[in-house]
Image (cartoon, rainbow, N blue to C red):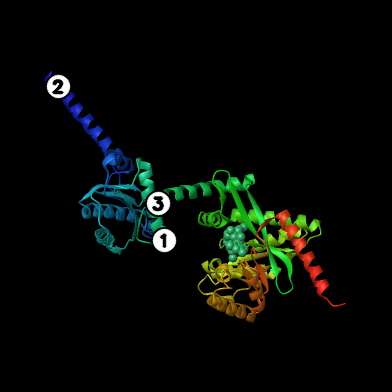
Amino acid sequence: LQVLANTLSIMRENIESRENDLVYQSQHDNLTGLYNRLAAKQQLSLLLSKMHGSLVMIDIKNFRHLNNIIGFANADDLLVLFASRLESLSPTAQLISRLDGDSFLLLFQPSIPLEKLDNYLRQLTNPFSIQGSKISVNVRVGIVDLSSDYDCNDIDTLIRHAEIALNQARVESLGIATYQQGEDERYLRELMIIRDLPIALAQGQLHLVFQPKVNIQSNHCHGAETLIRWQHPELGFIPPDEFIRLAENSGNISMISDWVLNTTIKQLAQWQLQGISLTVAINLSAHDLTNPQLPLDIEQLLISNHLPINALSIEVTEGAVMKDAQTVIAVLQQFRNIGLAIAIDDFGTGHSSLAYLKLLPVNEVKIDRSFIKDIHTDATDLMIVDSSIRLIKGLNLSVVAEGVESVEGINILRGLNCDIIQGYVYSKPLKADDFIVWFQQFNQSNIQTLSKDTPH
Ligand code: C2E
Ligand code: CA
Ligand code: CA
């Protein structure tokens, strides 16, 4: 009996210890021994109703890159050292956990003052010694301030708020960012836009509008800029700047550019059948301009639709050129070689406008609306526009003024020798059919005025 009792007791202890091991393993990260994501969420759930202080999410900047440079084994060692430094530096933290990869979550109650956190991060990022080498790391930090006006009652949302703050720190290259009320709505909206864009393109939720470009010296309209519009079934009208920026950041911009290009060509082919010829400008993004195949594809598309090369032109911002100037200039040169006209968009909003302009193979410069809109009341804007026009014309390029809203503006710009105006004063961007009505009427009435003015 004694033997049996001993055996049973040993078995019980073994089971208990195995259970403890399993519980430990399920709650701790194998590598660093810190709490894992699951345990962090459990701990936070227990505290949720009376949580205060600050939730701090930390990630190591460019960790993936570091991984590639020093190798996985060394990167693991680095994470272990980093984790133990986190523990030794934050004796007051209620929770220290590793969510995944290089992302750590800490809870400080009461909250940690910003200068203390600064100091803490400085010590945390002192170089680590790995295999005899000193390895430096930088961190980014997202904070949720759990003060009384912060309201959140589920853990997933809470963690997402910390991630949003961290992301803010990342995109604005700040070291530290704090979650602001309302950012969640924006984040969810942005996710929805990114998610829905491919479906929207496939389902025909997007359409193009055309805004006339009028030559103010000859009073004739030769073409238009095409602009994209999206009416989302739930979100309603989404401004193009918003979803274009998101598509650029999420790597989806070529999907839009392809759609715009194909839709514009189809429209041009249809107009050509009706005997209408004009030049339509499309907007291309930085990413499009690193594709050396694009100029040839566009040329092919024009040829196969029996359109002349000058049926299309392109607009690019200076910022897009600067992202990878060498590659982009080579692609622009190819566009130029096949005979497509190129305009620099939003001129004046970049940094090195003047120096670069002479290097770029462009035909036209569009002065940004911000300089044009108050030209009739603001003497400084007038002077800037005047000298910009002189400079651009000095380089033998044609000048477009964007965003002219008044007749006064037309007269001033004509006096300054500006070539083309695009603005509400002539027309807002219009759907294809409305645009053609406007286009034919405008050019017709100008021919009439011209013939009236011509002496017999
Ligand atoms: P952008 O290329 O500078 O286009 C000109 C913008 O100025 C258009 O805004 C146009 O509606 C607006 N505009 C023109 N005249 C006036 C005026 O007299 N007054 C005022 N207040 N505004 C005027 P929109 O259509 O909202 O487009 C905004 C930006 O979104 C565009 O700026 C362009 O950067 C981007 N975008 C639009 N469509 C496309 C597209 O198909 N592809 C790409 N990559 N970007 C596009
Ligand atoms: Ca444009
Ligand atoms: Ca512009």
Q: Is residue 131 visible?
A: no
Task: Read off the residue under disc 3.
Answer: 164
Label 1, secondary structure: give it.
Answer: loop
Q: Is mark 3 within 8 Å of ligand 1?
A: no
Label placed on residue 36: none
User: Mark 2 is on which residue type?
Assistant: Ala
Rate crowding at label 1 as few (under 14), some (14 to 19) or many (20 or more) other CA atoms within 10 Å: few
User: Is tag 3's residue or tag 2's residue first in the polypeptide sequence?
Assistant: 2
Rate crowding at label 2 as few (under 14), some (14 to 19) or many (20 or more) other CA atoms within 10 Å: few
User: Mark 1 is on which residue type?
Assistant: Glu
Q: Position of residue 238 (x, y in %)?
A: 56, 51
Task: Read off the residue under disc 1.
Answer: 172
Rate crowding at label 3 as few (under 14), some (14 to 19) or many (20 or more) other CA atoms within 10 Å: many
Q: Is mark 2 within 8 Å of ligand 1?
A: no
- The Cα atoms of the two marked residues, 1 and 3, are separated by 12 Å
Above or below, 25 relative to 310: above
In contact (CB < 8 Å): disc 3 and disc 2: no
In contact (CB < 8 Å): disc 1 and disc 3: no
Above or below, 24 relative to 314: above
Depth check: give the residue in front, 170 or 154.
154
Q: Nearer the viewer, mark 3 or mark 2?
A: 3
